[in-house]
Image (cartoon, rainbow, N blue to C red):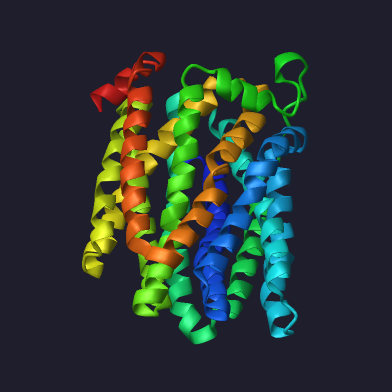
Amino acid sequence: MSAVRSRSVWALVAAEVVSILGTRMTYLALPWFVLVTTGSATKMTVVLAVEMIPMALFGVPSGSLVQRYGGRTIMLISDLARVPLLAAVPILHAADVLSFGLLLVLVFLLGCFMAPYFASQRVILPELVGEDERTMSQANSFLEGGTAFAALAGPALAGVLIPFLDAPTVLYIDAATYLVSFLLILAFVPRRKPVPQAAGPTHGVLAGLRFLLTDTLLGPLTATVVAFGFLSAGISAALPFYAFDEFSSARIAGLFYTALGAGALVGSVLAIVVVRRMKPLRLAGLGILAFAFPLWALPFQPPLGVVFAALFLATLFTPLVNGPVIGVLTSRTPVALRAKVMTAVISVSTLAAPGGFLVAGQVIEHWGVVPVFALVAGGITVTAALFAVIVLTHREDEPAAPAEAVAA
């Protein structure tokens, strides 16, 4: 059965859309709040880095929690816990007691729930749609589509609301989205029995990381994933500062993220269709190469329309990479190890992000955003080429396309 016909998957995607809507609004509202209250690009990037640090530190151990208690339970806990944590930022600011150090503590705690939440979504998917690699790739692309829609709507909504309500007030709305996501999961995502703890090679906190590093495909990809995490952080830091410094406009910043989200949304629709007709690794290899080229427009600071187009075209290809790769990753991983492997992947992918934010902040403070855009474009091009070589040389690991997909 097609993944997009599953009622349970639709419920999961709906919860994802609402939860990520809040997250994406925070991506703009929180750095904008720091820029408005401090005027410092360095402090802004410190806040972004601190939010990523827990994913690198606790992502691997959190896999054991997902495996023990089940993905649905961890998703419910993660959404509910983030409501008071995020709401505390505007509440304390209004009371004039929010120091920069306290803000970092709250942001750090928020980051603790990101890795287990993402891993829980991917652990639940095969329970809902089965073990077929292509179906899982399609389901992951569908979930990526929900994320892309939220990525499209969230920053745009935040960019419109900030001038009218101010950034602290928008953070209240962000907190409410986590509560709505909690209720959706509670009501519509079916309860599943957690995967039992296993002995032997699947036992232990580091079992997922060991599997990841020793797999002949996933091991080489790990290094490229770390590089992408570092480089992507540079773009995430540069875009809001570019909008703040050059245009003094939260709406422009929102439109930057809207272009990113729009590209990912359109790409997700394409991926849902194409992944049924093309081998996942071949699709990912070609998609990653196409992703890199539009980024070369950014260092030249072209007109805003060109910037929006470049961001749109780049992220148009990300679902053609993410969905297939996650589907292949899930199918290659033993069921008892999936939660630990997923959280290991998240930890590895975010390991270098805090460093990327901090380096970008220093470069922006001293030389502006142009060097950051140039370094990111060059670094991503090289890393994308390495990624493509790795996945395209492992195509023999994939099953042949089913007859009905080829004939379609």
> Could you say where residue 123 lies in the image, as x and y percent from the top left?
61, 35
> Could you say where residue 177 lies in the image, as x and y percent from the top left?
60, 65
The residue shown at (47%, 84%) is: 163
167 or 333: which is nearer to us? Answer: 167
Quadrant occupied by the N terminus: top left
199 or 55: which is nearer to us? Answer: 55
Q: Is residue 110 left or right of residue 11?
A: right
> Could you say where residue 231 lies in the image, as x and y percent from the top left?
43, 47
The residue shown at (51%, 27%) is: 329
Please tell me whether residue 225 is drawn above or below residue 398 in the rendered image: below
Q: Is residue 404 left or right of residue 52?
A: left
The residue shown at (33%, 24%) is: 389
Please tell me whether residue 276 is drawn above or below residue 172 in the rendered image: above
Determine the image quadrant of residue 257. Answer: bottom left
Q: Is residue 254 left or right of residue 75?
A: left
Quadrant occupied by the C terminus: top left
Determine the image quadrant of residue 170. Answer: bottom right
Please tell me whether residue 19 is drawn above or below residue 241 in the rendered image: above
> Could you say where residue 14 lies in the image, as x and y percent from the top left?
53, 54
Furthest-front residue in this view: 366
